[in-house]
Image: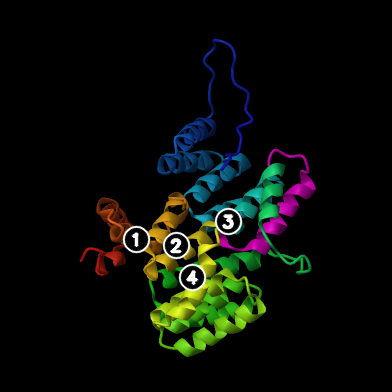
Amino acid sequence: MQHVRDDRKEQENNVIPFIPEGDFYFTKGIEAFQKRKFDIALKWMKKATEAKPEEPLYLCQMSVIYTEIGAFHAANQLLNRVLQSSDYVDCYYLLANNYAHLGLLQDAKKFALAYLEQEPNGDLSEEATTLLELIDIDEDEDEDWDLEDEDELLIYQETVFYHMESMEWEKAIPLIEEMMTLFPEHKLAKHDYTQALFFSGKEDEAIQMEKDHLATEPTSLYSHVNLALFYFQQESYSEYEMHIQALLNVYPIHEQQKLRVAVTLARTNRFMEAYQRFQLLSKPKLKGHPSYFRWYSVAAFQIGKENLARSLWQEGVKKYPKLAKETAPWD
C-alpha cells in the first residue's frame, strides 16, 4: 500500500528547525509505518490528529494504517470525515481500495471512477485504473450512491461477519434477512444466509437456494464455496468434487475471497491445497478473522507443520478468547 505523501519541504540549512507538535508526531508515525510497526504508527498518528484534528493528510495516513491491519470500517470512517470537510482527492482511491477488500465491488468502482474524474493524471491514477480492471461489475447498475447508506450496510456487514466467524448461526440469520431486504444488491448476504441456514439445520433449503443462484450465475465463487462445503458435510462426494474442482482452478483477487477458498479447502480435508492458499494470504489484512487462525492451524498441523500450527492457534486464542473453548487440531 502506497502511503500518503508528506509534502512538507525539508530544511536544508544548519539551523535546527522548530517542528510543530503535529508534524513531529506525523513524522514518527511515518517512520514506524515504513518499518511495518503498525501499532506504534497508529499511536503516533493518533497524537498527530489530536494536535491537528482536521489535517486531511494525517487522517488519510491514519486510514492507510487501519487498512493495513484490516480495520476497513475504521479507515472508511476517517476518509468520509475528510471528504465532509475538504475535497482531498486521494480519499476517493483509498475508499475504492477499502471497499474492494470488503467485497463491495460496485462501490469500489464508483470511488475509483470519482478519483479518476478529478485526477486523471494523479499520483494514484495508475492504481485506480488497475483496480477498475480487476473488478467485474455490471455497467448498467444504478450509479447513485449515498455514504450514509454505505455506513449502515457496513454496520450490518460487520455484525453479521462477527456472528458468522463465531459460528453463531441463529444470531446471524435475522440480521442477514434484514440486510437482504434493505440492500438487495448486496450479493454476499445471500450466500452468508444459505450457510447460516445449512448449519442451523435447514440443509435442503440452503442447498436448493445455492443451486438456484448457480443456475443464474454459473461462475459464482460463493455458490461453489458453499455447495462444496454443504455436499462434503452430507458425504455427497461426487457433487462435492464437482464444486471443489471449480475452486481449485480459481485464484481470486480479494483477500476475503481468497480466505473463503482456503477455509473451504481446509474444512473439506484438502489440507495441502488449503495450506498453499493460506500462504498466499496477507495476514495483516485478516487479523479480524478467527477463521484464518482456526483453519490455517488445522491445515498446517495435518501436513506435519506442528510448530506453525501451534503458533497460529496460540496467536488466535490471544486475539479471540472464544477460540480457546474449541478443540485444538492436535487434541
Instruction: Find the distance from the CA under tag 2 to the CA under tag 4.
Output: 11 Å
Q: Secondary structure at mark 4?
A: helix
Where does label 3 land, which residue?
A: 253
Marks 1,3: beta carbons within 8 A: no
Whether residue 105 can be seen here: yes
Where does label 2 land, which residue?
A: 262
Q: Secondary structure at mark 1?
A: helix
Disc tally is 4
Figure check: 19 above or below 88 = above
Structural crowding at the residue carrying mark 1, measured as other residues with C-alpha within 10 Å and reported as few (<14), some (14–19) or many (≥20):
many
Figure check: 113 above or below 165 = above
Structural crowding at the residue carrying mark 3, measured as other residues with C-alpha within 10 Å and reported as few (<14), some (14–19) or many (≥20):
few
Tell me where residue 160 appears, x and y as whole percent. Answer: 48, 72
Looking at marks 3 and 4 on the same chain, the residue that comes earlier in the sequence is marked by 4
**Is residue 93 or residue 302 the one in the foreground?**
302
Figure check: 201 above or below 266 = below
Where does label 4 land, which residue?
A: 244
Whether residue 226 can be seen here: no
Q: Secondary structure at mark 3?
A: loop
Q: Amino acid at mark 4?
A: Ile
Q: Nearer the viewer, mark 4 or mark 1?
A: 4
**Is residue 78 or residue 114 the one in the foreground?**
114
Marks 1,2: beta carbons within 8 A: yes
The image's mark for residue 299 is 1
Marks 2,3: beta carbons within 8 A: no
> Residue at (34%, 61%) from the top-left corner?
299
Tell me where residue 31 appears, x and y as whole percent. Answer: 47, 32
Please give the range of residues in magenta.
Answer: 102-124
In the figure, is residue 307 to the left or right of 258?
left
In the figure, is residue 206 to the left or right of 8?
left
Q: Secondary structure at mark 2?
A: helix
